[in-house]
Image (tube, helix red, strand yellow):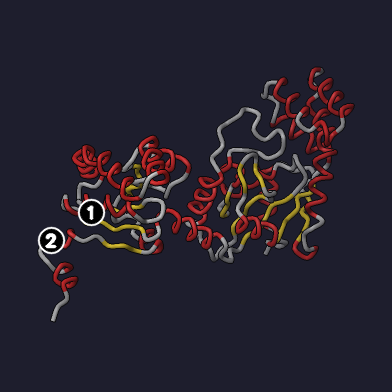
Amino acid sequence: MKSPGDSLRHSEKPYLRHMVISPQEFLAQELNSPILDVRTPAEFEEAHIPGAINLPIFDNNERALVGTVYKNHSPDQALKVGLDIVGPKMSSIVSTAQRIAPDGKARVYCWRGGMRSNSMAWLLTTAGFQVDVLEGGYKAFRNEIRRAISNDFDFRVLGGFTGSAKTQVLHSMKEQGAQVIDLEGIAKHKGSSFGNLLEEEQPGTEAFIVKVWDELRKLDPNQVIWMEDESRTIGRVYVSDELLYQIKNSRLIFIERTMEQRAAFLAEDYGNIDPHLLKLGFERITKRLGGQNVQLAIELIDQGDLAGAATIGLRYYDKTYSHGLSKREAENVQTFDGKGINPEETAKALLASNIWK
């Protein structure tokens, strides 16, 4: 005898029942159906599943109101307030969903896979959609991508003192066919006190982690993946424990360049930056560099001697990087002589060498 569930599943209107699926199943349906993020615009802006479209049940203020009622009164009262808010929106939500998913198939998620996503799924299935709900919501997705990042990738980490043009070498390696993850590019920050002098808006840490995962999943995990050596933070963005562990425990290729070569590179790299911003960068590290050194660097900037000013800054950054390098296992660090050659030549020679294989 068939159970009621079997009858519903095999009825003429199977869409009357939505399916709750795991993060792995949800993500595996990459091209099958649009993803609807039913969280607030603020939650969506902080971070979301790549490719998702925001179709919120509540706006930011409405969610705050429901939460306040839940906390100060009761879950039942909060539910009634939520129904009063959503009721007038239902027709508009369905119309929007029909434009986004004209074939009537959609994937839906909220924060924990609870009332918001299931309410949206109920509404859309009632309107004739076939809906899959992400089990555990965005929180489960976040756990899944952190697990994925902690997989045993075959990373090679490009190291070197500040001014060694590591990012430029990485970009050239990518142009020459290597697999590369540009963490500083994703974080929109070059690192150090001078890393974001143009004040480009950085993503939040959560959005950064999602972007790293999204870039990693496009690459072949069975082949070497190159990235730059990083510390716990890149500007205001925090590197996740899983990724930091990979960075610190993978083989590091240390590019050797002369102080003069590095200072000249930094002078060229920052040559178009407003001198006032360069001075602010030095002032931010006054306690570490010393007031007299900062004042001398500022005088050199005023004189147009950016290489001289960079040399002063490098004395501090070299000590800091050397300290971090000393914590690595010696057998995991190999040096590459990059003195006298540009980033493109460095990338070509490095990829042709055997030291990283």
Left or right of residue 113: residue 129: left
In this view, which residue lies farthest toward the bottom? 1
Report the residue at 48% width, 52% height from top: 214
Q: Which mark is residue 13?
A: 2
Give the vertical position of 4 relative to 142 (above or below).
Answer: below
Q: Quadrant of the N terminus?
A: bottom left
Name the amino acid, label 1.
Answer: Trp
Left or right of residue 247: residue 15: left
In this view, which residue lies farthest toward the top? 302
Give the vertical position of 10 relative to 92 (above or below).
Answer: below
In this view, which residue lies farthest toward the front? 73
| Element under disc 1 | helix
Q: Do the residues labelled 2 and 1 touch (CB within 8 Å)?
A: no
In this view, which residue lies farthest toward the right? 292
Give the vertical position of 85 relative to 241 (above or below).
Answer: above
In percent of width and height, residue 336 lies at: 76, 54
Image quadrant assignment for residue 277: top right
Mark toward the viewer: 2 or 1: 1
Image quadrant assignment for residue 340: top right
* Residue with the mark numbered 1: 122
Q: How far apart are marks 2 and 1 (CA)?
A: 14 Å
Report the residue at 71% width, 30% height from top: 268
Report the residue at 80% width, 38% height from top: 261
In percent of width and height, residue 280 lies at: 73, 25
Left or right of residue 205: residue 280: right
Q: Which of marks 2 and 1 is nearer the N terminus?
A: 2
| Element under disc 2 | loop
Report the residue at 30% width, 43% height from top: 82
In percent of width and height, residue 251 lies at: 70, 61
Q: Quadrant of the C terminus?
A: bottom right
Name the amino acid, label 2.
Answer: Lys
